[in-house]
Amino acid sequence: MYRQARFYVRSALIYLLAAFTVAAVLLLNQAFGWDGRLGVLQYVFYHLLMVGWATQLIGGVALWMFPPFTRERPRGNETLGWAAYVALNVGLLLRVVGEPIHALQPGALASGLLAISAVLQVAAAWLLVGQLWPRVRQRITPPSEGRRG
Amino acid sequence: MPRPSQFMIRASLIWLVVGYTVGGLLLLHKAWPLFYPLWALRSAHIFMLLVGWLVQLSAGVAVWIMPRLVQPGVITGSGDRGDLRLVWLCCGGLNVGVGLVTAHSLLVWLSGGHASAFGWMPALAGAVWLMAIIAFIGNVWQRVRPVIDPLKMISHD
């Protein structure tokens, strides 16, 4: 597994831990009624799990194991993958901070954080697809072997 | 990578960008209210990413990488992937279903929230998804097995 894929997968594991930490807090709060305001973390939990964990893990594994782009450049344009990684993680972290602030104290700061987060996460999806799309293909085989898929 | 897997993975990547773009619009709307009926697209956003992206990508990759069905004396790696018509059925079903729930959300949005006339669309999507999943399991079930060396017929776990 090469360096970029390792970054994706390790980050995904950290988000998995974070998501279930938030889930535990939400469930404990539900059981013991610590503070009603903690309920604002529900959206944070969903997105830590689905964006931080699921999407990022799938992205990392796909970058690692999808068929090579060419023999010379097996991973295609790695810059797109790094740009997607930064955009996804910064976007998600801004949301993790901005969502509770927006729910509890709406204002220009929270709205700004959410707007930047939205733009970065959408950009991350497009960039990741930009790197993966050319690698969704049959594997490269020597001409004599034919294309078995 | 077989053609139906390529098709499913590419379709899942399309649903990824469409689903994230809709999600981005919803988040922008939360920050600065753009257009209230936009919120009707929330369920479409969820199904695009859950079924169109996650389920479809998983199924497409599974069809590609699960052990192939091998016959005695056939060289390893050249076995077949079972009945690929089932995979095409799965692919069609998943995408038609996501298309139906997306169209439903759009129609509810355009009609100003009157969902009752279009209630059949999510129901049909549910039925089509069920058919798709049965077709997918029909293909991969027999391929969930140890890898077999066809020349020796010895399994390698």
Image: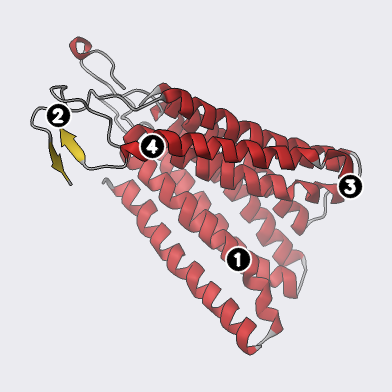
Q: Nearer the viewer, mark 3 or mark 1?
A: 3
Question: Mark 2 touching mark 1, by CB under 8 A?
Answer: no
Which residue is label 4 attached to?
B140
Question: Mark 4 touching mark 1, by CB under 8 A?
Answer: no
Mark earlier in primary sequence (3, 2): 3
Residue B113: mark: 3
Q: Is residue A2 left or right of residue A113?
A: left
In space, the residues marked 3 and 2 are separated at their CA atoms by 59 Å
For badge 2, the amino acid type reads Pro
Residue A44: mark: 1
- Mark 3: few/some/many CA within 10 Å (<14, 14-19, 20+): few
In space, the residues marked 3 and 4 are separated at their CA atoms by 41 Å
Count of labels in the image: 4
Q: Give a yes or no on whether discs 2 and 4 share a subunit.
A: yes
- Mark 4: few/some/many CA within 10 Å (<14, 14-19, 20+): many
Compared to residue A148, the image places residue A120 above or below, namely below
Question: Mark 2 touching mark 4, by CB under 8 A?
Answer: no
Residue B150: mark: 2
- Mark 1: few/some/many CA within 10 Å (<14, 14-19, 20+): many
Q: How is the image coloured?
A: secondary structure
Q: Is residue A79 left or right of residue B45?
A: left
What element does badge 3 sit on? loop
For badge 1, the amino acid type reads Val
Compared to residue A144, the image places residue B108 above or below, namely below
